[in-house]
Image (tube, rainbow, N blue to C red):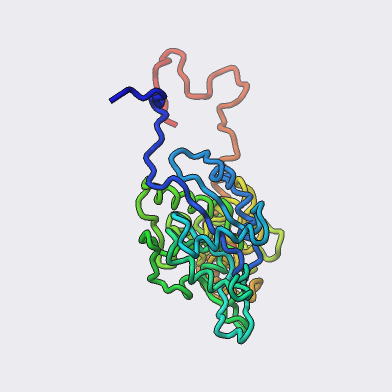
Amino acid sequence: MAPDPNPVPKGKERPPSTIEELDVLWLTAGLSCDGDSVSITAASEPSIEDVILGAIPGLPKVRLHNAVLSYEVGDDFMKAFHKGARGELENFVLVVEGSIPNEKLSGDGYWAAIGTDAATGEPIKTTEWIDRLAPKALAVIGAGTCAAYGGIHAMKGNPTGCMGLQDYLGAEWKSKAGLPIVNVPGCPVQPDNFMETFLYLLRQLAGLAPMIPVDGHGRPRWLFGPTVHEGCDRGAYYEEADFAQEYGSRKCLVKIGCWGPVVQCNVPKRGWIAGLGGCPNVGGICIGCTMPGFPDKFMPFMDEPPGARISSVLVKPYGVLIRNLRKITNHTLNKEPKWRNREPTYTTGYEPDRPNKTHPL
Ligand code: SF4
Ligand code: SF4
């Protein structure tokens, strides 16, 4: 065999990828505010530009089709979706943003649609797009709580009867590549949470990572395992039963509406953008926006969560005692040792005649 005229320098080999190119069909036409599409533009680990420009070696080349971020408009923008529906896209990932309406309730009209059917001239419903695309997608991702679980649009009293992906496709649904629905909840989704999950899936589809670990609600376990409270830097105030009575306080917010102890989310730990911002860590009560029960089970948001009344009462005797004991220790730690002085003789315990003697503290 003839030697390769352009050998790859040692150490620069590209890891083997089973997929060279991939389209991302991002359906923003659920019942949504496009907040998740906007949110991901703030990501940096990785940024969306990193992924599209191929800054990460070994991953498929990504073509993103998102109405909020796309250069193409109108029918040009819809071409990739029609190709995907016709089975002409070899590899694509379907991302759904927004709640999925129950079109059985929309009568002769429709709740949500994008694009037009060339044969009938009628708008193509969002549900129709999901029906056409999901069976052909390598993976289906719910971006944000609305797509994942229904979210704010699906609250009690809504007229659309809307729902999340697992309600629509079924909790046991699997893609043709064998992946379950992957949900990245959040209202909106935390930028790096989405991009990190997307990166994981790209690595998996490229044959570089094992099956994505998700819980029974489709959430990546490494992001949504711990609770808000477990990552909140106000936890010490909670432990010492030192609770804020009003907004603007630096103390624990549980008595003014924080649901952090029972909500799975990493935002206070991770920050919002580049480690900055968040929710309870910076003074905003956690309203449970990542949870399947959001928002109804958390309202009215600014009332004390019922469970917090019990736990904050129980923690009080221990917390107050510990806080006072710590104050005493803190007081002693704020004093320098007495041997730091200007006396003409040693008071440090050092003995000039026996300089190697060690002194216990
Ligand atoms: S502010 Fe909320 S999340 Fe933070 S320690 Fe208090 S209850 Fe927990
Ligand atoms: S901390 Fe609470 S309110 Fe903030 S993003 Fe997480 S779940 Fe939503």
Q: Between residues 191 and 55, which one lies in front from this camera angle?
A: 55
Instruction: Farthest residue to the top: give it.
Output: 353
Quadrant of the frame with the N terminus: top left
Q: Does residue 218 show up? A: yes
Residue 253 versus residue 42 in the image, above or below: below
Q: Quadrant of the C terminus?
A: top left
The percent position of residue 23, horizontal first and vertical second, equals 51, 53
Q: Is residue 4 left or right of residue 165?
A: left
Q: Which sits in the foreground, 184 or 315?
A: 184
In this rendering, would 44 be left or right of 88?
Answer: right
Residue lying at the far left in this picture: please name it.
Answer: 1
Residue lying at 60% horizontally and 37% vertically, measured from the top left: 335
Q: Residue 215, image x and y in percent? A: 40, 63
Q: Residue pushed farthest front? A: 119
Residue 278 percent location from the top left of the image: 62, 55
Question: How many numbered discs?
Answer: 0
Relative image position of residue 66 (x, y in whole percent): 60, 57
Residue 225 seen from this side: no
Residue 16, compared with residue 188, is above or below; it is: above
Q: Is residue 235 left or right of residue 20?
A: right
Q: Residue at x 66, y 54 (%)?
A: 72
